[in-house]
Amino acid sequence: MKVSGLVAAAFLACGSPSKPHPTSASWETCYYDTDCKQRAQAGGGSATDGRDSHDPYDRPEKPEPAAPKASGPVGDKAADLREAADLLDKAAAALAAGSKSRADELFSRAELIVGAEQLAPIAPSFREGAPPRITTPTIKVEQGPAQPKVVGSSEADDVEDKVPPPKVEGSLTGAVMIDGKPLANTYGLVTLEPASGKWKPRTPKRRVIEQRLREFRPHIMAVPVGSTIAFPNFDTVFHNVFSTSPLGAFDLGLYKTGEAREYTFEKEGIVRLGCNLHANMSAYIAVVAAPAYVVTDETGHFAFKHLEPGAYKLKAWSERTKAPITRDITIKVGPNTVTLGVAADAPAGPSPDKFGGKRG
């Protein structure tokens, strides 16, 4: 007999009475029950009028008392497991309803409780269609003053690296414009590459983009190719930093305040960041191969103070622009100026979530 059959047979055997119960007031039907027989002979009470209080098999069952909840470490662990199970139930329901981002959030919160390795077998069900998940352990990051709105300048990097300026130099100032007007509350990037196509690659950097007051700081950061950026959470709520850019697609998952994960950017181009929990949060990382670069201010103005004179290929971009424009420029000894026009052709509004779903 199979295990299930044995269990069923045992259940039936334990659940059946061991002796027949009377079905009428006749004393013959009470043959195995002396008390019942005496009542029938005396004409007092019928075997069909209810339970016999003298029959232990006929008494109503008392409900089992609720088991006391454990306290201390065992109780804490039990509470955690109950919470994780509840989150998994909700995650499964959200996934069945087609809400992939919500399902992933709930599943990720369950992971934080019991550990990702415990839920690894079912993780693909909740992650399919999202960027690659970064599962490296989080690192602790001390919170300092808020960073500027924009960060990134090759000349600031040279000061940091103690690289001397050219002995003979020119400067370049100018503005990035849209439809003949300066940028307004919008930032951009300008890079310069020697027309010869030859230059020494810049040294990769280690930088930080914070999640603070439900926004990214800096909003735009320019770094050399190969740089590593940490993304600490300095809020009391969870964030989920991600990018779907083919130049650097990643998903950092959830982590608590004061913790961070890192990502290394190996390909040149513009990487847009989002938070899968807060649609209003966005930022840009300009991963630059050019030897000279600078982020504009919010009106599009920029300045290079120390350039070797010569022919360059200039590229300009704004956060309202899909792709950079390119033009040739010659830097002469002394001051130089330029005005650059870019298109406002980037999609407006919040970016899609990490599954490609539309957000309001």
Image: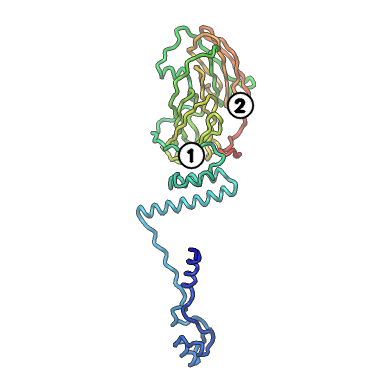
184 or 56, nearer to the observer: 56
Three-letter code for the amino acid on which mark 1 is drawn: Gly
- Mark nearer the N terminus (1 vs 2): 1
Q: Residue at x 39, y 59 (%)?
A: 69
Which residue occupies the extreme left position in the image? 72
Around disc 2, counting alpha carbons within 10 Å, would you say few (fewer than 14), some (14 to 19), or many (20 or more)? some
The location of residue 18, given as percent across then percent down, is: 46, 78
Q: Is residue 129 left or right of residue 6?
A: right
226 or 73, nearer to the observer: 226
Q: Residue at x 49, y 12 (%)?
A: 307
Name the front one of labels 1 and 2: 1
Question: In the rendering, which numbered label is found on residue 253?
Answer: 1
The location of residue 310, given as percent across then percent down, is: 53, 9
Three-letter code for the amino acid on which mark 2 is drawn: Lys
Mark 1 and mark 2: span between their CA atoms? Answer: 27 Å
The location of residue 144, given as percent across then percent down, is: 40, 31
State the residue position of label 2. Answer: 322
Q: Residue at x 53, y 51 (%)?
A: 90
**Can you say whether 60 is above or below 281 in the image?**
below
- Disc 1 secondary structure class: loop
